[in-house]
Every structure is written in C-alpha cells, then in structure tokens.
Amino acid sequence: MIEFGKIIFLVSFFGCIIQSLILFGDNADEMLAIPLMLILGGAGAFFLSRNSDDEDSGFQINIFLWAYSLRLWMGMALYGWELSEIFGDEDSSGYVYGWRMASNWYENGFDGFISDLVFVLFDQQNVGQALIWAIPTFFAGGESRMIVSVVNSLAGAMLVIVVFRMTRRVFDSQTARISAVLVTFWPSNILLSATTAKEMLVIFFEWMVLYLLIRTPRGLSVRDGLLAIPFFISVFITRFYAIYMLAAAALFRFLVASRRNIMRNMVFGSAIVLSVLIFLNAGGMMNRDFERLERLQGQVGTWREGMARTTGSGVEIYSEAESTTVAIPIATVYFFLAPFPWEVFSGTARNAFGAIENIFIIVILIIGFPAIKIVFKDRFVEMAPVFVFCALYAGMHIWGLSNIGLAWRHKQTIMPLLFILVAVGITQRRAGLDLLAGRLRKGRTDHKFIPVK
C-alpha cells in the first residue's frame, strides 16, 4: 500500500483543486494554496530522492507523500468544509499575524522584514511562527488559512522522515518503517499538522535538533552542529522554554558520547551550546525568559483553574489535591492518558476524539514497554538526548497541567519516542515468533535471539 504514495499525492492534489474551485471560488487568496501544495510536495520528494543509493529512498518518498496527502485532506476538511469547530482549532487566529508581517514587508520593504526579524528574536516570545507563515503569504499576496495549513502539513510530513531516519540510525530499517507508518497515520499528528496552530512546526524543529544530535554514531559532527543552530533558533522563537531542554539534551549527548571521542565531543559540543546561550544572553533574551517563568509560576494556579473552567475539558488537579506530592502523580496520569476511555460520550467532540485515541496509547504503552529494556541496555548512548528532552518536556507540562485540551496537544511532542519504542517492541516480537517458527520447522534448538541492531 505504501508504494502507491505518488499516486495518492496526485489524486489528493487534483482532489484539492476541484474542492478549492467549489469552496474558494470567490476567495483568490485561498486558491493560491494550490500551487503551494504542488511546490512543497515536489520539493520534498526531490530532496528525498537525491540519494539514489539509499535502499530506503523509495519508501521515504512514498511515506512522505502519504503523510503530506493525508494532512492536505484534513486541512481541506477543517477550513474548506468548515469542520474546525468540531475537531478543535487552538490558536486559530495566529495565522492572521503572518499576513500582518507580510503586509509590513509590502509597505516597508526589506526594512520591514528586518524589523519583524528583530521583533521575534529579541522583543516578543513565541511568535516566530508568524514570520515563517509570512513568507508564503507574502508571495501569495493575501491572507489565507489554507496556505498556513499547507506549510504546517509539510512540517508534519517531514517529521515522519525525521522519525524514520532517527529510528534507522539507532536500530534498523525494518523498525524505522514501522515507526514511520505509526507517525503517518496517527490521528492527532494528522490533525495538528493540518491546523493553523504552530504546534507541528515546533515539534518538527525540536525533533530535527534531536536527530542531528544523534545522527553521527561517533558524536556530533561539525556539519551537524552547524545545521542544528538554525533549528535551535527556530525553536526559540516559536517556543522559548524548549530551547533550554534541547540544550540540556545536547549537553547530555556530549557527556555520554563514545569514550573514543569524548574530549572532542565535549569541547565542540560545549562550544555549540555556549554559543547559543551567549547569543541569547547578549540580546537579553535569557533574562526575559526567566522573568517570564517567574511570572508564570505566580500565575499558573489561577491559569490552571481558569482554563479548566472555561474549556470544560479539564481538571483542577493542583487546586484540589492536598499536596504537590499527591498532585504530581495524578497530573502525570492525566497528561498521558486523559481523557479516559470511559469519557468517550461525555464533554466535547474533541474530548471524545482524545478518549478514543488514548485507548490506542494504552495499547502502545503495553506493546512498547518491553522495548525500554532493550533501548536502555543496548542503545542508551544513542537515545540519551531523546530521553532527556522528552522527560524534561513532559515534566514541564505535568507541572503546568491546566486542562486536557492543552495536555492532548503538548503530549504529541513526545509521541515520536513512544512510536519508536512500540516499533522496537513489534520488531522484537516478530523476530521471536520467526525464531520460534523456524525452530518448530527444523526441530533445532541452537538458534539465539538476535537483538535489533
């Protein structure tokens, strides 16, 4: 089925053309998303086809086009057929900010672009996605939700490739294909990729940094270190606090790298991390960030209660629990598993959607749990930065848990790790069954179980 990715994309592209003529016939700005779909899809497929010697090249192209096509269809459903209210669309007004920046570039030229660049780097936090969306919007010449949705869909499809290559690097091609399929067809990933929220952009940037940290078995190479810098900056301007978690993951990578190159990795890696931190500190951004965290700490209690009350999809864990010692384990369960299966028919449509999906998360945790031992025993050095980042990110949001809607959204950041673990678990189970079948057929007992490499 996966090998039909190119056909699926062509069918999806022409399907979007027909739907756009019907749905956006009176809105030329939205119609301009159509050529962008083709340009980004073609560019992605071309990029993935450059290495013809890669035996997985064909799979990567097809799985990318599958993922991209599914997200384009979801975007059309959300904003063409106006189903966004049913599925939910947090931060739905953010796309307007992109057009405001593009308008500034029209009025003030290159000076307008520089002023917006300085603004997202030094003045205002967590609005860098508007600068990214403003670029295609500028060329389109108008405000368009579909253009933003297409850009986010590309980020979601590229995340599939990042997870595939990360899994293949640490384990093997078979395991990588399973993890890529899981990311491609995971409903929340499709939904977030198609919306006009910034979530999928941030997740892609974060996991791209993690991939670059572990791509070279011997440690961080000069090339990967330089490539990581723009992704570090992209994370900072879209989700400021995640940059410090990635920096911790990077530092941990240097510390647990191969002993053969430990000094080189520590020196070079520390230089990369320090250069980023010096850049942030020089612009006053670090002081600004920590001041904001202090303000959040004072406001977070009221924020939790307010969000839970106004959305109707949350719980006031920290205000109701007797102590933090009791609240944190409860918040952890809610972060990973709420809304619970028995809440399918209660609350909003998003609540029902999340409850159904979390049934599969429970299954994933059961299947993937045995793989944790394998990962820690044989692949801890390679996976250490990923574990560090996911633990810090989950901990941050468990501490700041306000409602299920936000927990559902932020949980998707660490889902690639769960997909990798379940892919390892499936591969191991399959290897065990194949080994057992071989023994039964041949009546031999001299086989040994070979771990994933």
Image (tube, helix red, strand yellow):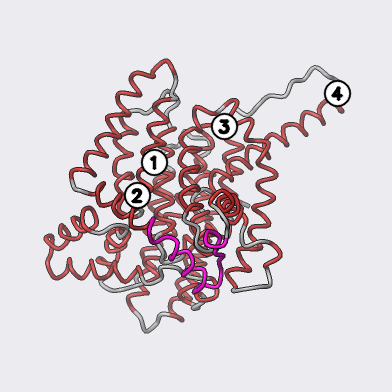
Q: How far apart in space, not on screen, are marks 1 and 2 (Cα)?
A: 9 Å
* Nearer mark to the viewer, of 4 and 3: 3
Read off the residue under disc 1.
Answer: 246
Q: Helix, strand or loop at disc 3?
A: loop
In the image, the segment drawn in magenta is 297-320
Q: Earlier in the sequence, mark 1 or mark 2?
A: 2
Mark with earlier residue (3, 1): 3
In the rendered structure, are the residues bearing label 4 and label 1 in contact, judged by CB atoms less than 8 Å apart?
no
Q: Residue at x 24, y 35 (%)?
A: 275
- Please state which amino acid type lies under the numbered disc 4: Lys
Q: Would you place residue 133 above or below residue 178 in this image?
A: below
At 41% from the left edge and 51% from the top edge, which residue is drawn? 44
What residue type is disc 2 on?
Val
Give the residue at mark 2. 235
Mark 3 belongs to which amino acid? Phe
The span from disc 4 to disc 2 (Cα, nearest Å) is 54 Å
